[in-house]
Amino acid sequence: MSDDEHTYEESLMGEEEETALEIAALQSKDLLPQPKKEFAYHREALSALRGEISQGKLSWIQRCDITSTTPVVVDKAEDDLDRELKFYQQGIEAVILAKQKIQKAGAPFSRPDDYFAEMVKSDTHMAKIRQRLLSQQKGIQNSEEAKKQRELRKYGKQIQQEKLKEREDRKKAALDKIATIKKRLRSGDMGDNDGFEIDVDSEDDAHTQSASGKRGKDNRHVPGKKRQLKNDKFGFGGKKRGMKRNTAESTDDMSTFNVKRNKSAGFGGSSKKSKVTRPGKARRQRGR
C-alpha cells in the first residue's frame, strides 16, 4: 500500500472521529438543563429615561410627532390584508391631524409649482422597469388572444361538424326517397312521387352524363368542354383502322398535289438522271 493511500485512509478516519464527537456534544447539550431566561420590567427606570429624552418643552412644529387617537386592533395578526388596512387608516388619520397642526402653526407645507425634486432612481432604471411592465402586459394580451383563437377554432370545428352532419342527413334522406320512388315505379304504383321525376333505366347514363358530358337532341352523346379541348389538342380516339385508305373524294382531290416534288419524265420532265452530289465515304469521314 502506498503512502498516498495511507494518508487518504487516515484523513477518512479523522473525519469520522470528528463527526462522532460533534454528535456526542450535541446530544449532551440537549440533555443538559437549560438556564431559564429572566425578563425585567422596571417601570420607574423606563419612566426616568423617557423623561430625559422627552421633547415636551419644544413646540410641535419642531417635534412633528403624531399620536393616533384610535388604537390599532387586529383580530388576526396573520391576516396581512386586514393588518395593512388598519395601518393605512392610521396613516390617513395622522396626515389629517398633521395638516391641521401645520396650518395652525402657520408653516408652509405645500410644494411650489416650480419645485424640482431629483428622483431616487435614475431614468435608465425607470425605463427598464417600464419596459418590463410593458413586456408583461403584452405577454398577458398575447395569452388572452391565443386563448380566444383556441376557443374560436373549437367553435368553428363544431360548426363544421354540424354542417357536415346536416349535409349527410340531407343526402341520406334524398337517397331514401329516390329508392322509395324507384320501388313504386318498378311495382307499377304511379301515385304521388313527392315531386321527384326519375328515369330508373337511365341511372347509369345520368351518372356518365354528369361526369363527362350530356346528350344532344338526337340522343347522341356530346362531350363536355374539358373533353372537347383535350380532343382538339390530343385527338379523340375512335376508329383507326382504314383511316389512311383512299376514297373517291380523296382521289379526286388534287389540292395537295405538288408539281415540283412529283416532277418526272412522264409529266414533261427531263429524262436525264440527276448527278449524285453526295460525297464519298472517305470524304465524309474526313469531314467529321
Image (spheres, rainbow, N blue to C red):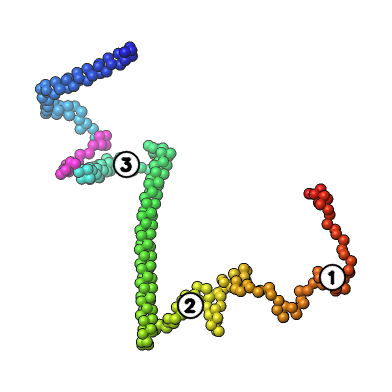
Q: Amino acid at mark 3?
A: Phe
Give the prevailing secondary structure in the magenta stretch.
loop
Instruction: Measure how far apart labels 2 and 1 are at the Cα level.
Output: 58 Å
Image quadrant assignment for residue 30? top left
Front position in the image: 279 or 23: 279
Counting from the top left corner in percent of width and height, residue 262 is at 81, 70
Give whichever of discs 3 and 2 has the lower sequence position: 3
Counting from the top left corner in percent of width and height, residue 45 is at 13, 26
Around disc 1, counting alpha carbons within 10 Å, would you say few (fewer than 14), some (14 to 19), or many (20 or more)? few
Give the vertical position of 96 relative to 205 (above or below): above
Left or right of 110 in this view: 17? left
**Residue placed under numbered mark 2 in the picture:** 205
Question: Is residue 14 in view from this perspective?
Answer: yes
**Residue placed under numbered mark 1 in the picture:** 264
Left or right of 12 in this view: 190? right
* Mark 1 secondary-structure assignment: loop
Residue drawn at 20 percent across, 32 percent down: 56
Front position in the image: 137 or 62: 137
Q: Amino acid at mark 1?
A: Ser
Q: Nearer the viewer, mark 3 or mark 2?
A: 2
Give the extent of the magenta segment: 61-78
**Residue placed under numbered mark 3 in the picture:** 109
Give whichever of discs 2 and 1 has the lower sequence position: 2
* Mark 2 secondary-structure assignment: helix
